[in-house]
Image (cartoon, rainbow, N blue to C red):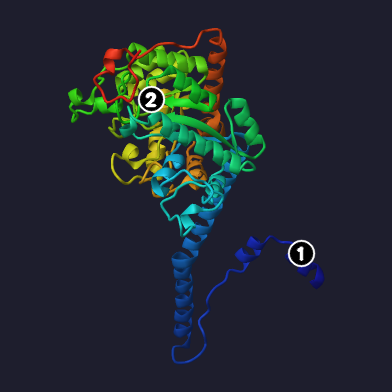
Amino acid sequence: MENEDSTAKSKRPLFVTLKKKPITFAPSKRKNGGGQRSWAMKAGLFLLACALIAGIGLPLALELRSSNLLEARLRVVRKILSKTPLIDGHNNFAWTLRKQRGSTRLRDVPFDEDLSKNSSWGPSWQTDLLRLRRGIVGAQFWSAYVPCEAQFLDAVKLTLEQIDVVRRLASKYSRKMRLVTSSSELEQAHRDGILASLVGIEGGHSIGASMAVLRSFHHLGARYMTLTHKCNTPWADSAIADDPDKDLVTLGFFSDGLTSFGKAVVRELNRLGMLVDLSHVSVRTMRDALAVSSAPVVFSHSAARALCNSSSNVPDDVLRNLTLNGGLVMVSFDSAHLSCGDKASMHDVIAHINHIRKVAGVDHVGLGAGYDGISSPPSELPDVSGYPLLLAELTRDRRWPSSDIKKLVGGNLLRVLKEVERQATNLSNQSPAEEWIPRELIEDTAYCRYLGV
């Protein structure tokens, strides 16, 4: 019977046993207050344990939990980017190389190392192949940038040299990056685990007001052209025209948007299958280009003007028109565009992404950081390696399911590229544009041009 009773007790749930025999602190039988001292000691140990749990254990547990949650979100991001390439719309490495190093020589450029940790280069460099891989970047538009001061002088030559830098980089590191000129080539490079490299022309002054130069850039691989930079051209107004502090009389070529030649440039970009990029242009030029273009347009590195009243950013009425046009804004990481100051955070980037999504729709937003062309990126995103952290933060927001993050990182731009290519196929039977800039617009300038005929 004793064994049976013991067996029965062992099968009882633990809480029943505890309920039947509650734990109590019995007074000690020792003399001179021993019971009180024992009780006080036990109570003190209990309070100390609580303090340790509250003061040390809980923060540590929360830290571990936070770390685990971040790693879980990063796993989601890596899975997304394994299927959809992250395509960044703008990077100025080629020009920064020339500006900072005094040449375009590549033999001394350890581009497959972390340049920020190389004593010969320094921490200001934001781009290299090692950090691009850490950032899980699938495709990069490399900007062939030329300063506005080169307009009417050697802008065409300088642009050719920047394109040459990109092409030679792709050739030198052919196992890690590949020059591509179409959406299908981009997708194939991503499947092969190689960085797809595309060329963008930053500034219409780079073509020297010549359709032939534009077509030549296309033959060399350029797949977008920003219509202006921070200067007007003889055929298009830049964002400087929207600056109330500027004297428009001194700017020259004030056309109040696109001239007839400028509209012909947009149509020729459509015919060639090049993206029309509207970063840095005036609002009137934005509207004119949207009215003329038969293909979706892009803003390769801009943000929302409603959040930062920078002339380089996009106003809400233009964002709404993007819904009809099918284009997109690739959000810049430049603090001057994000906060209108010299400091910004990752959450400023997210705020601009969410605003563009709210006004234009999730199909019309992308990423165009502008690394190696910006001196003050967000503190959490100092270089090209930071994209996974940004996307991991977005996964916390229920408004951003994986399907929408795929659109943001590259799905939207791939759609635009394919539509631009489709439009070019439809226009392939058209003759190349033969418009010329009227002579009277340039004969009073310092334009280095033979005017004999």
Quarter of image, res 11: bottom right
Rendered position, 81 above or below 379: above
Q: Is 232 situated left or right of 185 in this image?
A: left
Q: Quadrant of the C terminus?
A: top left
Can residue 367 be seen? Answer: no
- Residue at 32% across, 27% down: 152
Q: In terms of depth relative to the viewer, which is nearer, 332 or 351?
A: 332
Q: Quadrant of the N terminus?
A: bottom right
Q: Is residue 424 left or right of residue 449?
A: right
Image location of residue 278, percent across then percent down: 39, 25
Q: Residue at x 40, y 40 (%)?
A: 333
Q: Which residue is mark 2?
A: 204
Number of numbered callouts drawn: 2
Residue under the point 47% across and 61% down = 59
Q: Residue type at mark 1?
A: Ala
Q: Is residue 228 above or below residue 147?
A: above
Q: Residue lying furthest bottom in this view? A: 31
Query: Of marks 2 and 1, which one's residue comes earlier in the chain?
Result: 1
Residue hosting label 1: 8
